[in-house]
Amino acid sequence: AFPWPRPLADAPHRATPHPRLPKQLEATHTTGDAVPTVIEIDTNAVEGASTTASMVHGIASSLFDAAEGQHTAQSKPWTAWPVQSRGDDRLTLRFTWLADDVPMPPAVTTAGASSLRFHRQEMPVQNLSIKHVSYAHLAATPASATHWEIQFHSPTHFSRDGHVNCLADPFLVLSSLTQRWNFFAGVDLAIDSTPAALARTIEIEGFDLQSEEWPGPKGQDRRGTVGGMLWRIAHGDPAQRNHLTTLLTAAEYLGVGKETTYGFGVVTAQPNTDRP
């Protein structure tokens, strides 16, 4: 079963699927006031509709297509989590709209969506919850924790040198998070530590990881890392510790790796306060 993270209502008020952002893209925000939005939707299952990655992406596309043709954009400004089945034919979907400078469709912002469309089928919306979180608030998270529990809830995979890599090592995780943070959070909150420098501050004190395969786009399976790791911030200066804390706190919103618009790369990080 999918090890679903805590419900949206229980999450602390802190400020996640788009492809890997091209290096040539630059942040468009000039101030630290960008506010991503978490959207959680309860709906009824439709007979014959499978809760696959393609379903997640298809519903997200139908919701967000109105936002200036974002479905065809190279860097899509949203992430998605896999469908959570709650029994009694109830499903929960979660999306995060990352770009403050691209407006969401009115049907979402006004909580007025009465149904979702997937393959010409209508899925009635039972509840729609919207929560705003701030990049500036995330960046202000105190860098007091030295140990972090990293959970890979859905298969996480990367593109490196033209090849797919399904091993979630710290460098690849931090490269993905840094790239997305700098693009969406704005230049005033930009992280100037390189992913390689940040990865050198990390020591892996434990892990329970495995390779898992899920159905992906166009019926093709995707293999990636799932499970948990315990990171210790063992080195680094105060600025690097602040940057690591920011990126790890933001991971559940930004998503990690490839195909996060399909529900892959759902990663959460929590400080382990039991460790010194």
Image (tube, grey):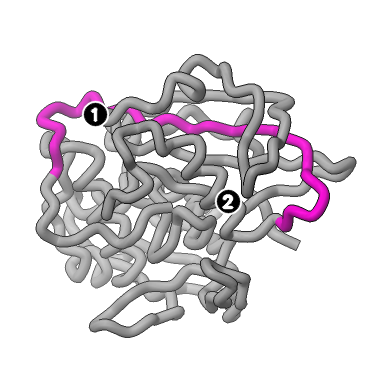
Amino acid type of the residue tagged 2 in the rendering: Val
**Highlighted range, magenta:** 27-50
Residue located 53% across and 24% down the image: 130
Decide which of 124, 152 is in the foreground and name it.
124
Nearer the observer, 216 or 271 = 216
Residue at the image point whose x is 29% and y is 71% from the top = 171
How crowded pointer 2 is (Cα within 10 Å; few <14, some 14-19, many 20+) is rated as many
Query: What secondary structure predominates along the stretch shown in magenta?
Result: loop
Residue type pointed to by label 1: Asp
- The location of residue 62, given as percent across then percent down, is 50, 40
The residue where tag 2 is placed is: 56
* Quadrant assignment for the N terminus: bottom right
- Residue 8 in the magenta stretch? The answer is no
Q: Which label is found at residue 150?
A: none
Q: Are marks 1 and 2 in contact (CB under 8 Å)?
A: no
Residue that mark 1 sits on:
101
Residue 65, x across and y down, in percent: 41, 38
Q: Quadrant of residue 86?
A: top right
Q: Tag count in the figure? A: 2
